[in-house]
């Protein structure tokens, strides 16, 4: 049976999607609470090293603290003995380029919970940026859809951290079809072995051989790659008893009347197949992968993940 289609208004080639995003002030307030809560639970460096290496830190030596460093790294016992501030140095420490590649394409603009995926992804990226900068590493930001819509070079200053937050809350950078290939083109030739790449996306349309191949290239060149899949519950399953509704393809703008109940099972199967393909691509290359839904509490989900990593 041919499904009826909606004709778009004259001059329109696609459906215009609303961009729901945090304001700068709202995101800064939320990040201040969430990042500091995680730090209070685990300690700043412990979070970071568990993420990057899957293990804790091994003490190497003490060195004198400088005013430009994070005060939470001060070893107060050593400071009391020596009458001046000292910090512990660990053998895994080195200055890294941490690249946060955040998906801002049309599929990320959708959501059925308190936060749409773009907001949740901004929160995740902001926490990672905060932890990275406060760990002494250089953090860069890359937003992508069908192209790189914004890029900020890696930096370790708090001023540049706030610049990244301003950019990630600017709605003009959001929307467009998803074209993953713009990311490897942007980062593979620009960064070296002391690079950690965070890919924050719903990964819709990315469970394919092309993405798996790019992930292998990243693994060969970079220190670590970390995939954080941010999904709305409706990305994985559809509710019962909905009946027929009009659904729009966020990439093509095509709108069809669909009987949701008739496709629920096939939809869930297809969604799970794609999610597992993405997860397998990370696992096959020895990289980290974490899926989180937008209706999950951010702190609880991350705390549970960190505890698993530490086992």
Image: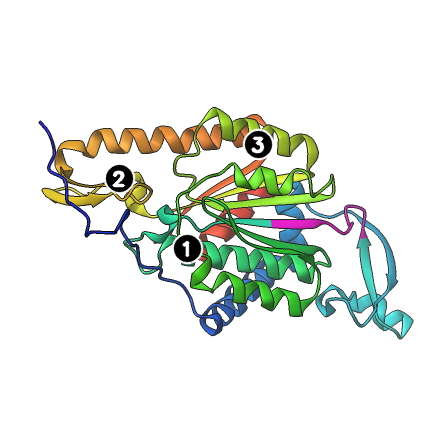
293 above or below 130? above
Where is residue 161 drawn, in percent x and y? 62, 65
Marks 1 and 3: in contact by CB < 8 Å? no
Picture quarter with the N terminus:
top left
- Dot 3: within a 10 Å radius of its alpha carbon, few (fewer than 14), some, or many (20 or more) residues? some
Q: Which comes sooner in the sequence, label 3 or label 2?
A: 3
- The tag on residue 118 is 1
Query: Residue at left 28%, top 47%?
Result: 14
Which mark's residue is nearer the viewer, 3 or 2? 3
Q: Give how far apart the Cα atoms at labels 3 and 2 are.
A: 27 Å
- Dot 2: within a 10 Å radius of its alpha carbon, few (fewer than 14), some, or many (20 or more) residues? some
Circle 2 residue: 237
What's the magenta region? 90-99
Where is residue 46 drawn, in percent x and y? 66, 53
Which mark's residue is nearer the viewer, 2 or 1? 1
How many numbered dots are placed on residues in this image?
3
Q: Give how far apart the Cα atoms at labels 3 and 1 are.
A: 23 Å
Where is residue 236 drawn, in percent x and y? 31, 39
Answer with left or right where residue 89 lies relative to residue 267.
right
38 above or below 56? below
Element at badge 3?
A: helix
């Amino acid at each position: 049976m041919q499904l009826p289609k909606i004709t778009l208004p004259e001059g329109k080639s696609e459906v215009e999607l609303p961009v729901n995003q945090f304001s700068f002030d709202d995101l800064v307030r939320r990040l201040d609470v969430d990042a500091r809560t995680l730090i209070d639970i685990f300690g700043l460096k412990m979070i970071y090293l568990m993420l990057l290496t899957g293990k804790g830190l091994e003490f190497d030596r003490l060195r004198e603290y400088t005013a430009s460093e994070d005060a939470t790294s001060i070893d107060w016992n050593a400071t009391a003995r020596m009458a001046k501030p000292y910090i512990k140095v660990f053998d895994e420490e080195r200055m890294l380029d941490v690249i946060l590649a955040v998906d801002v394409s049309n599929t990320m603009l959708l959501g059925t919970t308190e936060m749409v995926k773009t907001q949740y992804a901004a929160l995740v990226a902001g926490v990672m940026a905060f932890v990275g900068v406060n760990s002494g590493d250089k953090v860069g930001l890359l937003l992508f859809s069908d192209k790189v819509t914004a890029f900020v070079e890696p930096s370790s200053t708090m001023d540049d951290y706030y610049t990244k937050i301003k950019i990630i809350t600017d709605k003009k950078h959001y929307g467009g079809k998803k074209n993953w290939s713009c990311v490897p083109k942007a980062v593979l030739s620009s960064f070296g072995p002391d690079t950690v790449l965070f890919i924050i996306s719903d990964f819709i349309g990315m469970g394919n051989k092309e993405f798996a191949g790019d992930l292998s290239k990243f693994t060969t060149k970079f220190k670590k790659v970390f995939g954080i899949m941010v999904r709305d519950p409706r990305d994985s399953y559809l509710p019962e008893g909905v009946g027929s509704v009009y659904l729009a393809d966020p990439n093509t703008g095509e709108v069809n009347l669909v009987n949701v109940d008739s496709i629920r099972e096939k939809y869930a199967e297809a969604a799970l197949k794609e999610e597992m393909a993405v997860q397998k691509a990370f696992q096959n290359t020895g990289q980290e992968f974490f899926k989180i839904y937008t209706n999950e509490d951010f702190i609880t989900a991350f705390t549970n993940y960190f505890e698993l990593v530490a086992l």
